[in-house]
Image (spheres, rainbow, N blue to C red):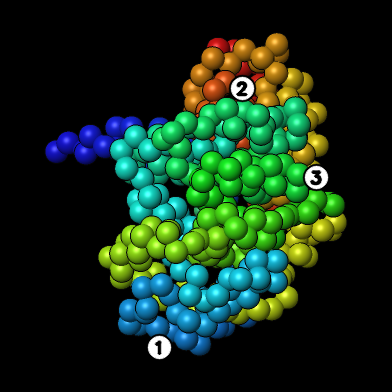
């Protein structure tokens, strides 16, 4: 049986051959350190207790379908979150829940794109964005994020990529894989470009509470209430509940002329009936109380200390440089081509896996052009990071392609 022709254009390499090889090795009994996925709970970063209690409490009444947009109490909580963050116009009617941000990304693009439509996507990106644009018949046009400038988007490059076919701009802030948190100036510049060219903005802000040091996260919808925008977030990272598949979107800046798109989105929401109902009950409690993620991202907190440790160890490896992330859960390290001559970074990751039982992700899987980066997830405790980055160091010391 053949797969659909449409899928031939879809790239989602970070879960491709590398992961298949890791699964084969695990099936054969190998123990692998897996620093390839931003999934907090397996590393002992537990979902906060009140959220679990609320889900359990509501389980008995959560066995039927809900409103296709999601339960009202959760949509009110999401609207309040955006209001508090400065997007004061967001109402529960503007909120839709989904089975994680992943489902909402696909739905939002399906509702927008016709064949050949273009979407501006950052390079590097969380690759679901590029893959989903292709799946929907569109073309992902990558704009440059500047490693030399803390991976901030390059506004000139962004503007130069707009054509008559451009429909939308994706902003991932904080960014996965780079950990960049966009400055207010850069973000306003991006939103101004969208405004001037009539582009719909997709603001993926799933890491908005995972911010280190003195970085400040600016909510895009608050900076540009007049620009048509779909902001997205969820419980997977900030509340360590990736398995719940609990995400949301908030619609802002739409005028009467844009209702056709919203109707399309609603059609798709209706067709998938509703998101997982027990997980929707987590949202009000999660967003209402003290955000326990704060204790993890400040000095002494696990994520803060793990980032410090992993970043220090990585940058001590000869020929490895790395921007110190200001947000999210990742280190996107560069292998200096003068020291490490890598032609195929996916091959490097498979060779590393096979020789050191360590699983990382290759940079080109995040849609960059050059095979000279790799991503390390720093969710593991310090002793495991120590072991893992030690293995990477000894691997690179002799590795040649
Ligand atoms: N957006 C970004 C930038 C991500 O990094 C991820 C997961 O890693 C997602 C969306 C998917 O999140 P969810 O678990 O809500 O589907």
Q: Nearer the viewer, mark 3 or mark 2?
A: 2
Q: Secondary structure at mark 2?
A: loop
Q: Please name whichever residue, 4 or 47, is drawn nearer the observer in this view of the structure.
A: 4
Q: Marks 3 and 2: CB-CB under 8 Å?
A: no
Above or below, 92 against 213 in this view is: below
Q: Secondary structure at mark 1?
A: helix
Look at the numbered disc 1 and say if its residue's Cβ is closer than 8 Å to ligand 1: no
Look at the numbered disc 3 and say if its residue's Cβ is closer than 8 Å to ligand 1: no
| Residue 60 percent coordinates (x, y) | 40, 88
Would residue 42 be visible to someone looking at this image? no
| Residue 211 percent coordinates (x, y) | 74, 54
Residue at screen point 77% across, 39% down: 324
Residue at screen point 58% across, 71% down: 90
Image check: 179 left or right of 78?
A: right
Image check: 361 left or right of 262?
A: right
Q: Quadrant of residue 394?
A: top right
Residue at screen point 44% across, 64% down: 256
Q: Please name whichever residue, 114 or 216, is drawn nearer the observer in this view of the structure.
A: 114
Label drawn at residue 308: 3
Q: Which residue carries the number 2 mark? A: 372
In this figure, what is the number of numbered marks? 3
Q: Marks 1 and 3: CB-CB under 8 Å?
A: no
| Residue 40 percent coordinates (x, y) | 60, 57
Would residue 163 be visible to someone looking at this image? yes
Q: Which residue in the rendered view is the most extreme toward the left? A: 1
Q: Nearer the N terminus, badge 3 or badge 2?
A: 3
Residue at screen point 65% across, 29% down: 156
Label drawn at residue 285: none
Q: Quadrant of the N terminus?
A: top left
Classify mark 1: residues with Cα within 10 Å, few (<14), some (14-19) or many (20+).
Answer: few
Above or below, 220 against 113 in this view is: below
Above or below, 387 against 64 in this view is: above
């Amino acid at each position: 049986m053949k797969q659909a022709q449409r899928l031939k254009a879809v790239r989602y390499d970070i879960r491709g051959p590398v992961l298949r090889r890791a699964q084969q090795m695990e099936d054969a009994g190998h123990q692998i350190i897996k620093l390839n996925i931003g999934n907090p709970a397996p590393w002992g970063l537990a979902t906060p207790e009140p959220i679990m209690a609320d889900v359990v409490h509501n389980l008995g009444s959560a066995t039927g379908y809900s409103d296709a947009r999601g339960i009202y109490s959760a949509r009110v909580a999401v609207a309040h979150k955006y209001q508090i963050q400065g997007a004061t116009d967001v109402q529960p009617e503007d909120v839709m829940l989904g089975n994680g941000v992943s489902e909402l990304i696909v739905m939002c693009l399906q509702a927008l794109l016709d064949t050949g439509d273009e979407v501006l996507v950052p390079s590097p990106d969380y690759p679901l964005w590029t893959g989903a644009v292709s799946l929907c018949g569109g073309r992902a046009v990558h704009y440059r994020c500047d490693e030399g400038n803390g991976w901030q988007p390059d506004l000139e490059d962004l503007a130069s990529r707009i054509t008559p076919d451009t429909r939308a701009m994706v902003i991932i802030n904080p960014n996965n894989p780079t950990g960049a948190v966009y400055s207010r100036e850069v973000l306003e510049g991006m939103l101004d470009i969208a405004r001037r060219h009539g582009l719909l903005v997709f603001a993926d802000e799933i890491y908005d509470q995972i911010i280190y040091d003195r970085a400040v996260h600016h909510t895009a919808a608050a900076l540009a209430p007049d620009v048509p925008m779909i902001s997205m977030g969820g419980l997977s990272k900030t509340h360590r509940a990736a398995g719940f598949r609990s995400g949301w979107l908030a619609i802002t800046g739409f005028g009467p002329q844009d209702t056709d798109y919203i109707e399309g989105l609603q059609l798709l929401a209706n067709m998938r009936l509703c998101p997982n109902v027990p997980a929707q009950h987590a949202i009000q409690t999660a967003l209402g109380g003290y955000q326990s993620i704060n204790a993890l991202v400040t000095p002494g907190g696990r994520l803060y200390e793990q980032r410090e440790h992993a970043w220090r160890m990585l940058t001590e490896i000869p020929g490895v440089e790395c921007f110190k992330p200001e947000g999210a859960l990742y280190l996107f390290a560069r292998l200096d081509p003068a020291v490490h001559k890598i032609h195929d970074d996916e091959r490097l990751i498979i060779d590393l896996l096979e020789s050191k039982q360590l699983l990382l992700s290759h940079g080109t899987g995040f849609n960059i052009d050059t095979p000279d980066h790799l991503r390390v997830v720093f969710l593991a405790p310090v002793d495991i990071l120590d072991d893992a980055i030690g293995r990477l160091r000894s691997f690179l010391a002799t590795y040649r392609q």
